[in-house]
Amino acid sequence: MHNTVRFILAGQVEELGHCEPTRTVLEYLREDKGLTGTKEGCSEGDCGACTVVIGELHEGGIRYRAVNSCIQFLPSLDGKQLITVEDLSDPNHELHAVQQAMVDQHGSQCGFCTPGFVMSLFAMYHHQPEREVERLEIDLGLAGNLCRCTGYAPIVRAAEQALQARRKDHFTAEESRRIEQLKSIQPVDGLDISGVSGRFFAPDSIDELCDLLASHPQAVMVAGATDVGLWVTKHMRVLETLIYLGNVTELLQIKTDGSDLILGAAVSYTDATKVIADRYPAFLPVIDRLGAIQVRNAGTVGGNIANGSPIGDMPPGLIALGAKLVLRSKQGQRVIDLEDYFISYEKQDLRSGECVEQVVLPAPPDKQLFSTYKISKRFEQDISAVCAAFALQIEDGLIINARVCFGGMAEIPKRAPACEQALTGHSWGQDSIDDAMQALANDFTPLTDMRASGQYRMRVAQNLLQRFYLENTDNPYPVRLGLRFQPTQNIRAAADV
């Protein structure tokens, strides 16, 4: 394994022969390089003030993605390009189009959040489609950046100005040279780098990963660090040995095997979204609210499962669909039902030396109704109070199979067997739904915490089942589908005032 982290910053290759395994990109920029344009706000990946953009080789070009530098560990930059707000103006010191738009539209007041917004807009600038960008896309792209001053309207106008037409900037002009520079620093093997406090490994194959897990059974596995990063920045934990999964080739693959969709455990939510939504469009509303774009660019499908959170957004839907997990160690593969992975609070069926290798999602069966729902205090950038998923097969008006799963209702993501029994074999109608709603009280005794009371959680769980029924049957009352609220022209006009 090589022992030097190499990445591009301000057009130059940075080489680090020693590096603390949990030193964040934000700490490096501000404390080591004196690049203070990138701000520290929340230190947990919520506010977006620390947003930077990572450039990576992808399909013959460079792919730019926004991430939260406050929870991104520095050694994970190996072989990549790091772009900060200081890099955006061209060699003649002309502002970038997104910076100029923020000036023109008065998108900055106190200015603290402005660099983060600018970097999110820069990433959007390099990913805009060959058409006019819709307001909803702007809202999604900026959801991970918080501002206390502007009310967002001038920032939205700045986004609309900057994204009106595809413009060439000095990054596109220098792309060929930058591609060659990135090729020159691509790791040809795994990374092993040490600091005073510990050691950071970045294997590049599943076999190498399994060898490391066997040799270092107490190591912490990390991919996007959207969870583990907070162990460091909020819990002040010292993690002596980290094994980074983001370079393991097999864990980054998306493929099909017969009718099954197979997602490598290190596939990011951004990369997984389309393939999941193509099969199960009802998953999209929950995925769109899983953190924000900075979190989805870094966070992984496998990580959201492996951490065992009782309020993870994806497990309820995956369990309702009958997903399986492929676990891997030096002894080989082990396949289990995803619902069996969760044993009790903070206890999962993951043996020493084992990792989550794949998530296997079956094809939709015939005549299945499926929906997922997330309830939280804020629409975006918030942890669920309740997350629900319903998958029912109905033939000739009869429910022949029902899988119902909730997050936030128990110490683990958990199916509702009494509710399922009240549905299975019964007619698809309000009477069956009423019985199933009552049966949920036999399945769960939800707790009361800072996010919701137990009574509220139970009422919400029952009402979500009612909502699922109303959205999937003819009824005289208009029901908004479980999709993100679509801004109207009136709202757009109001925002321009």
Image (cartoon, rainbow, N blue to C red):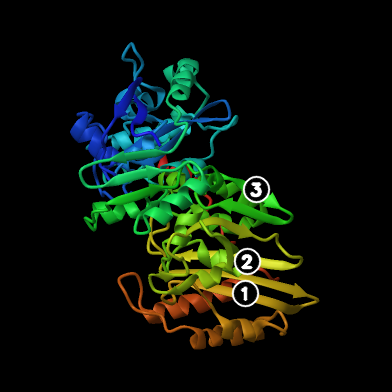
Residue 251 numbered mark, or none: none
In which quadrant of the rendered view does residue 338 lie? bottom right
Do we see residue 170 in this rendering?
yes
- Whether residues under marks 3 and 1 lie with C-beta atoms below 8 angstroms apart, the answer is no
Per the model, the C-alpha gap separating discs 2 and 3 is 18 Å
Question: Residue most toward the top?
Answer: 92
For label 1, the residue is: 403
Q: Which of 99 and 350 is in front in this view?
A: 350
Per the model, the C-alpha gap separating discs 3 and 1 is 25 Å
For label 2, the residue is: 321
Per the model, the C-alpha gap separating discs 1 and 2 is 7 Å
For label 3, the residue is: 255
Q: Residue at x 81, y 76 (%)?
A: 396
Q: Residue at x 65, y 86 (%)?
A: 431
Say what amino acid the circle numbered 1 marks: Arg
Report x, y in % for residue 191.
39, 38
Say what amino acid the circle numbered 3 marks: Lys
| Of the image marks 1 and 2, the number of the one nearer the N terminus | 2
Do we see residue 154 in this rendering?
no
